[in-house]
Amino acid sequence: MIEDSGGFYPGIGSGLDFVKKNGNGELEFVAISDRGPNFSIINNDHQIIAFKDDFSPKIVKIIISNKTNKAKITEFMDISYEGRAITGINSNKNNLDEEMYDKNFNRIKSHFGLDTESIAVLKTGGYIVGDEYYPSINILNKSGEIVKRLIPGNGLPEIFKYRGFNRGFESVTVSPNGKIFAMLEGVLNINDDSNKNSKLIRLLEIDLISGVSKTYAYPFDYDKYKNSSKVKIGEIAALDNENFLVVEQGPGVDSKYRNILYKINIKEAMDISDVKLQNGKELEFGSHKDLSNIRFISKKAILNPRDYGWRDDKLEGLTVIDNNSIAISNDNDFAITGYDAVEEKCNKENNKICKTAVARTDRTKEETNLWIFKFKSKITS
């Protein structure tokens, strides 16, 4: 349990990356926590109670023993910006679509906050952290300090400012050649009008040295969901410079939750950065017929974790260990399932009544799961 989590079991499985196999055979990973213990105010998803509003998202080191086959957290690291630890409170002044409240239902603000959802390790020893708020991609040094931020219109294509509600960068990875690849959690919602029928999710490629970026179209399983707003991308992990693993998930049309692992390839996919429909609209408004000339990313399903007992909806960590092995993890949302608004007298002189939100937790969701899958053949084959 992280000491400053307020007694909650932290959701450290929001992002996962493999670091190395130590000399004694131990497997070393880094993971990242979610923004903090929170829950939506009843009947309003855009208003969020932060039960521990000064919680600072953490980067953690995880070691799996080759003797006991058990995972253990060995280090915690704060993420800092301009000399101060960040919070998980939405401080986005340009796109403030979530209002954050403390447990006494008072509006709160932050000097700087991120909704940390994904992490990847750089060869320099630093980190890439994906943020769901802006959305943004953040480059950190070895000490966890943000040294560079990429946001729509400044380092990222401006169109990414149309990310859907709570659908920012859920996934980031670094390919062997040092390029960053990131996917939004869902389809773009351009002018609040494209998230129900869009046929694609954008995969972003960034060359940090040249600053050049490309965008590819990922063809999610459109017919498997009630509408396009339901699909989620949980994570991406690089196999090499053109092959990746992607977790596609969400509630299916049969009301059963899907967590499917796909291998994707970008070799033949076209850069859609400047491509629009014939009528001048963005590709998100196109039908299958309208998009027939677009060369999409190719994909192939290779694993359904639910076939092996996986039951968590939020499969948000994915990393490649070697040619035959991968690891996945879940975000447990700090085990919070709701809250009770408790009334009490907060001023005896005038009998003023105050409300306090008391979180409800589910002990069956306290743990973060980290599973390892080993394939009989090379994943890239």
Image (cartoon, helix red, strand yellow):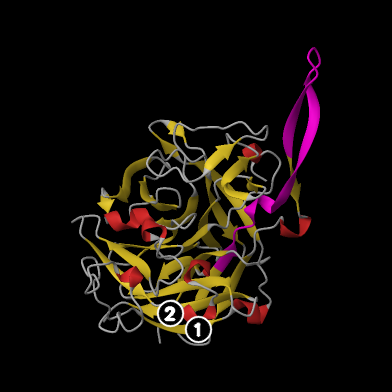
Element marked by disc 2: strand
Q: How many marks?
A: 2
Q: Which residues are magenta?
A: 328-357
Identity of the residue drawn at 74% across and 27% down = 354
Side (left or right) of 53 relative to 237 = right
In the rendering, which numbered label is found on residue 263? 2
Amino acid carrying label 2: it is Lys
Q: Position of residue 276 (x, y in %)?
A: 24, 70
Q: Position of residue 371 (x, y in %)?
A: 61, 69
- Is 342 colored magenta in this rendering? yes
Q: Which residue is mark 1?
A: 302
Identity of the residue drawn at 40% across and 62% down = 193
Element marked by disc 1: strand
Q: Position of residue 117 (x, y in %)?
A: 49, 54
Q: Are marks 2 and 1 in contact (CB under 8 Å)?
A: yes
CA separation in Å, label 2 and label 1 = 7 Å
Side (left or right) of 201 relative to 57 = left
Identity of the residue drawn at 45% across and 38% down = 91
User: Between 338 and 12, which is closer to the camera in this rendering?
Assistant: 338
Amino acid carrying label 1: it is Ile
Give the quarter of the image for residue 308: bottom right
The vertical placement of 23 against 90, above or below, is below
Side (left or right) of 361 relative to 139 = right
Give the quarter of the image for residue 123: bottom left
Give the quarter of the image for residue 100: top right
User: Between 353 and 91, which is closer to the camera in this rendering?
Assistant: 353
| Crowding near the residue tagged with mark 2, few <14, some 14–19, many ≥20 C-alpha atoms within 10 Å | many
Identity of the residue drawn at 59% across and 78% down = 253
> Disc 2 or 1, which lies upstream in sequence?
2
